[in-house]
Amino acid sequence: MKKLRLKKGAIIGAYLIAFSLTGMSAFFVSQNMQANNPTEEDIEYVNSSIIDDKEDREVIKEDVKMVKPYTNEEVQILKYFYDYQAEAETQEKSILYHENTYIQNSGIDFGLTDTFDVVSVLDGTVVDVREDELLGTVVEIKHDNDFISSYQSLSEVSVKKNDTVKQGQVIGKSGTNTIDQDLGNHLHFELYKSGEVVDPSKYFDQVISDTTEENSTSNGTTTEDTNDNSNTNEETE
């Protein structure tokens, strides 16, 4: 049998073809890898937050409601705020009697046999703590929206002037005073709106931002109306 011998040129050609195929394969593999794995220039890095807190985050504002100046549910109303338009029976429960003089109640008196905690009706700043001959120990707190709350006839005080207090924070305990000592242990609470005394019951459990100047008077009765009524009564007499 004759042995086949390839010519030198054929062998070199075969090697060249093999190298060419290998190079092409390597090229296509490289291209495929680059397509699946982007280079560093194609990668976009994010250094800031995806959500811009200042522009995209919705700010939720909670409605603030005025709470009552006590937490004990057994506390009862002893005297009501005097309302010129209230029924006669209610007005009778809104009159104080002191030294042979009848006085229209400018707040609400809350009472209980046992001493009870007195709390701030809203967040605020204590603007006054004092002893009064008739009213007893008094604490006054200034709040937003031009409100000032006054807590009178206290037996104990746990705050001082310029203290910042939170809504519901205990500021003292109920006690007695001289002007309505017949009530025994109680809290005399007054509320002022823009410098005018108002009926606190119209603001308890109400959203403060929704209150208006019209609500700041007793059943729509203004100071001018009150003066007019007084003048009318004097003329009638």
Image (cartoon, helix red, strand yellow):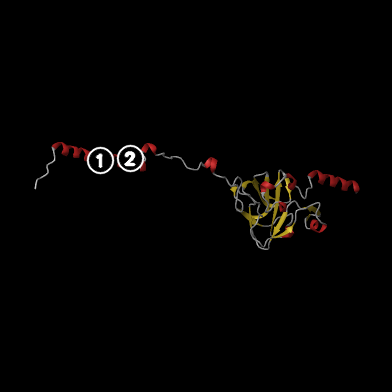
Relative to residue 176, is residue 170 drawn left or right?
left
Judge by depth and name the residue closer to the eye, 205 or 87.
205
Which labelled disc corresponds to residue 101? none
List x then y, in percent, for residue 140: 66, 48
Residue 134 seen from this side: no
- Residue to which mark 1 is pinned: 21
Q: Residue furthest front?
A: 1
Q: Secondary structure at mark 2?
A: helix
Establish if 236 lies above or below 175: above
List x then y, in percent, for residue 5: 12, 42
Judge by depth and name the residue closer to the eye, 40 or 199.
40
Q: How many marks?
A: 2
List x then y, in percent, for residue 44: 41, 39
- Residue to which mark 2 is pinned: 31
Q: Are marks 1 and 2 in contact (CB under 8 Å)?
A: no
Displayed quadrant of residue 69 = bottom right
Q: Secondary structure at mark 1?
A: helix
Q: CA distance from mark 1 to mark 2?
A: 15 Å
Tell me the residue at 90%/46% (across/down).
235
Badge 1 crowding class, 10 Å Cα cut-off, few under 14, some 14 to 19, many 20 or more, is few
Q: Amino acid at mark 1?
A: Leu
Badge 2 crowding class, 10 Å Cα cut-off, few under 14, some 14 to 19, many 20 or more, is few
Residue 208 seen from this side: yes
Q: Amino acid at mark 2?
A: Gln
Q: Earlier along the polypeptide chain: callout 1 or callout 2? A: 1
Relative to residue 182, is residue 38 drawn left or right?
left
